[in-house]
Image: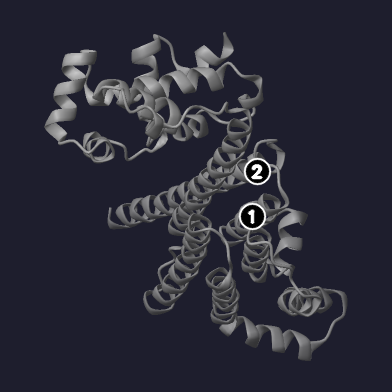
């Protein structure tokens, strides 16, 4: 009886262990697929096609291959065996460094490039050489090196990312660009420090946590990357929109020459000539300051003269300009979000909601008409 119970307990433990391994592999596989999918989008999309994004793609692919190796997915294949001898852990920070330099328009010297690639090239050669040539001294060295390799890897990568952050700090790039580059650099450092914590926990408590938590941190890095790239692309779109629009904008009579206008007409002219509505922060207070009136006076004038609220008064000009841009083929290459922000809306959701309320269809549907 007792023997049967023990056998059942042993069977349950084995099943639980198997299910845990399968679950970890499943979670890891999903994480790797998401990272590779995002990398593929960056690599193939015309919208995000650039040398800088290709370097970030290389960083993401390296990260996904590292997750694949850590979680021993496809471990019985030749690809996995080759992957085990390529020390790709020393590459993803190098790709990030190259990405940063590309974004801030700074060249990397050949000496720096060779120096950063040396750990990958040297150690990969040693590991491959340990198979090709039977050398007990080399095998002993590599076995001893593996004990400390995790700490060496993290130290190297943190150092490279830190040097990248120094480059960002010293660059003349715009504030938003530097802010994004700092964010992605810090996120990669957080991922590496998290891996270090997992390694320490594994040594102290003999608990393996690399699988699920490693994927979570990698997806965190992907999320930061995706958000930042989108913001950078929108900023680039806005600059291009500004250039096209400013070149095609007709000159108008200056507001200060129209001394006979009443306050409501003055507001309308401010919107048409100075295009105050393109400022996302424009509200009753700022409009009142521009007119030299009190906030209550602005509200009263708009209600009496235009039968409209200040918010709707401002938004009608934004929507009108958005409609003009959406029907102009010169602006079709830019994202709807960039157009929305360029006409004065703070967010994509506000633009879509207001546009549909005023026009009856979404900006995307209106553009296709």
Is 190 left or right of 149, judged from the image as shown? left
Q: Quadrant of residue 354?
A: top left
- Viewer-proximal residue among 276 and 16: 276
The residue under the point 47% across, 22% down is 321
Q: Position of residue 272 (x, y in %)?
A: 42, 25
Q: Position of residue 327 (x, y in %)?
A: 58, 16
Secondary structure, mark 2, is helix
Q: How busy is the neighbourhood of tag 2: few (under 14 within 10 Å), some, or many (20 plus)?
A: many
Question: Residue 346, relative to residue 311: is it above or below?
Answer: below
Numbered tag placed on residue 198 in the rendering:
none
Q: Residue furthest right?
A: 133
**Mark toward the start of the polypeptide (2 vs 1):** 2
Is 84 left or right of 246, judged from the image as shown? right
Q: Position of residue 6 (x, y in %)?
A: 33, 57
The residues tagged by marks 2 and 1 sit, at their Cα atoms, a distance apart of 8 Å
Question: Residue 147, relative to residue 47: is it above or below?
Answer: below
Colour pattern of the rendering: one colour
Is 310 left or right of 64, judged from the image as shown? left
- Viewer-proximal residue among 181 and 256: 256
Where is mark 2, residue-wise?
42
The residue under the point 65% across, 41% down is 48
Where is mark 1, residue-wise?
56
């Amino acid at each position: 009886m007792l023997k049967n119970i023990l056998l059942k307990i042993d069977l349950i433990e084995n099943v639980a262990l198997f299910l845990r391994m399968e679950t970890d592999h499943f979670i890891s596989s999903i994480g790797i697929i998401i990272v590779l999918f995002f990398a593929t989008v960056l690599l193939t999309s015309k919208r995000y096609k650039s040398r800088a994004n290709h370097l970030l793609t290389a960083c993401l692919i390296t990260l996904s291959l590292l997750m694949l190796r850590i979680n021993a997915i496809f471990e019985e294949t030749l690809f996995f065996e080759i992957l085990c001898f390529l020390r790709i852990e020393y590459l993803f920070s190098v790709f990030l460094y190259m990405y940063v330099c590309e974004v801030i328009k700074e060249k990397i010297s050949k000496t720096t490039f060779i120096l950063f690639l040396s750990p990958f090239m040297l150690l990969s050669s040693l590991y491959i050489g340990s198979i090709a040539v039977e050398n007990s001294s080399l095998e002993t060295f590599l076995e001893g090196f593996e004990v400390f390799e995790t700490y060496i890897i993290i130290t190297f990568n943190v150092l490279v990312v830190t040097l990248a952050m120094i480059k960002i700090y010293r660059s003349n790039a715009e504030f938003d660009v530097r802010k994004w580059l700092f964010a992605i650099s810090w996120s990669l450092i957080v991922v590496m420090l998290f891996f270090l914590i997992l390694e320490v926990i594994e040594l102290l408590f003999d608990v393996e946590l690399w699988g699920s938590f490693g994927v979570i941190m990698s997806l965190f890095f992907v999320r930061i990357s995706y958000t930042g790239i989108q913001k950078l692309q929108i900023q680039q779109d806005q600059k291009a929109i500004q250039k096209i629009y400013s070149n095609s904008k007709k000159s108008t009579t200056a507001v200060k020459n129209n001394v006979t206008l009443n306050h409501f007409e003055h507001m309308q002219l401010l919107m048409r000539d100075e295009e105050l509505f393109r400022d996302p922060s424009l509200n009753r207070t700022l409009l009142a300051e521009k007119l030299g009136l009190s906030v209550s006076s602005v509200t009263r004038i708009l209600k009496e003269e235009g039968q409209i609220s200040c918010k709707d008064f401002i938004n009608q000009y934004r929507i009108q300009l958005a409609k003009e841009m959406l029907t102009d083929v010169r602006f079709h290459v830019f994202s709807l979000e960039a157009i929305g922000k360029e006409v004065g809306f703070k967010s994509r959701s506000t633009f879509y909601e207001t546009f549909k309320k005023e026009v009856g269809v979404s900006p995307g549907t209106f553009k296709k008409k």
